[in-house]
Image (cartoon, rainbow, N blue to C red):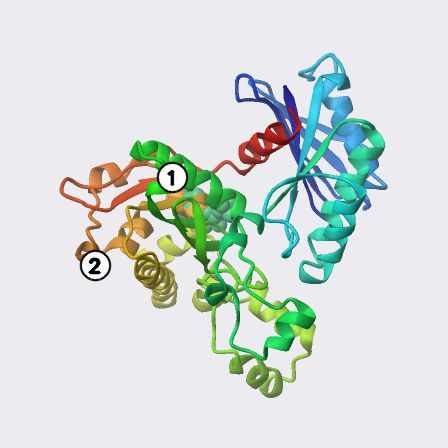
Amino acid sequence: MKILVINAGSSSLKYQLIDMDTKAVLAKGLCERITLEGSKLNHTPAGGEKVVIESPMPSHAEAIKLVIDALVDKNHGVIESMSEIGAVGHRVVHGGESFSESVVITDEVKKAIEGCIELAPLHNPANLIGIEACEKVMPGVPQVGVFDTAFHQTMPEEAYLYGIPYEYYEKYKIRRYGFHGTSHNYVSGKAAELLGKDIKDVNIITCHLGNGSSVAAVKGGKVIDTTMGLTPLAGILMGTRSGDIDPAIVTFLMEKENLGINEINAVLNKKSGVLGVSGVSSDFRDLSQAAEEGNKRADAALKMFSYGIKKYIGSYAAAMGGVDAIVFTAGVGENDCATRADIVDGLEFLGVKIDADKNSLRGQAIDVSAEGATVRTLVIPTDEEMMIAIETERLTK
Ligand code: AMP
């Protein structure tokens, strides 16, 4: 079965066509500037050169049509006809409390996704547009929604409620939801495989560290706590997002700097994090270089990042009554050996010990624990598209 995985943004659309029999990615690509001037499709068939197709995309439906055309093209296509696509899997950012699992899309499901727009105003509308565009271009092909929030729906009340009047939870559904669930789900499953254990028998702390970052406590395959909250702004320090701060800072800054709601949102989402602290960059490669050259603020930003994650590892180990493995994934987690070493430095009391040589490898699934470690430290490349394809196949086969 071949599955098309779609990640639709407001003006972009990423895709991968995956052959589930071989788990091979047949082609992938990105439509840029949908609804805008100068829209183009970057399409890369497996083992082939990237092709850039410049064509107007007045809506997501035209973008999907161009993707299908590229997939069946005589020169750079990878399938004979559209009928080879057995199902489409969509990344949907927010499923609220309605979805604790992936689902086959129906009119009712679309209504529920629409109902979550308030919780993810930038993402859910685009995800819905992507679904409707596929329905239009590929009528009859089953569509599945895979939610970033779903894997975290197993959190108990004490982890997801906030200490604000309960009526706001009832009225507005203000609670912790958590994000990157597809990634935490994928790498925790892979970690259990690597440990040679049933996921039901292990406590795992998964650290998804990229431009956006979150940590999750996965006990017996179920999330019991995670760092992101109502929105992906909460938790650990990120590339440009503040993570957790004293909430009183918000009103203090609004008053002192005369900022409106949009401006304070921009400060916390786009100008904060390691970028805001360092004044250098949100990219960890630039930060390491700056710190090496003696930039004190870049050094402080890197230390804050590692320290914050170390604290969550300690607290999640306590929350789960012990930990069997810590997993690092995503751009920083998979590639930044120095940051990994910094995060686990001092966690020897928990039984965490890494091997410097093994830890110097990047971009592959590997156990980097040193001899004598009782808690394994694993690096596992994430693959959200594969997870979406697996879920889509499970629900449609
Ligand atoms: P992601 O959001 O998962 O794509 O991660 C993107 C981030 O990964 C970038 O902003 C970089 O900070 C980081 N990154 C990627 N490659 C490396 C590397 N070799 N060393 C350190 N950081 C890296």
Can residue 132 be seen?
A: yes
Left or right: where does residue 356 sit relative to residue 291? left
Q: Residue at x 73, y 23 (%)?
A: 70
Q: Quadrant of residue 290?
A: bottom left
Residue 318 in the image: above or below residue 206: below
**Can you give x and y, in whole percent of width and height, for residue 237 in the image?**
45, 63
Few, some or many residues within 10 Å of mark 1 (<14, 14–19, 20+): many
Disc 2: CA contacts within 10 A as few (<14), some (14-19) or many (>=20):
few
Tag 1, which secondary structure? helix
Mark-to-mark CA distance, 1 and 2: 27 Å
Q: Which amino acid, by three-letter code, is at mark 2?
A: Gly
Q: Number of callouts in the render?
A: 2
Residue at image location 30% in from the left, 35% down from the top: 195
Which circle, 1 or 2, is nearer the viewer?
1
The residue closer to the viewer here, 36 or 19, is 19
SS class, disc 2: loop
Residue 21's label in the rendered image is none
Asked if disc 2 is less than 8 Å from ligand 1, the answer is no
User: Horizontally, is 225 left or right of 143 in the view?
Assistant: left
Q: Are marks 1 and 2 in contact (CB under 8 Å)?
A: no
Determine which residue is flagged by label 1. 199
Vertically, is 94 above or below 136? Answer: below
Q: Nearer the viewer, residue 390 or 125?
A: 390
Instruction: Answer left or right for 203 relative to 164.
Output: left
Label 2: which residue? Answer: 346
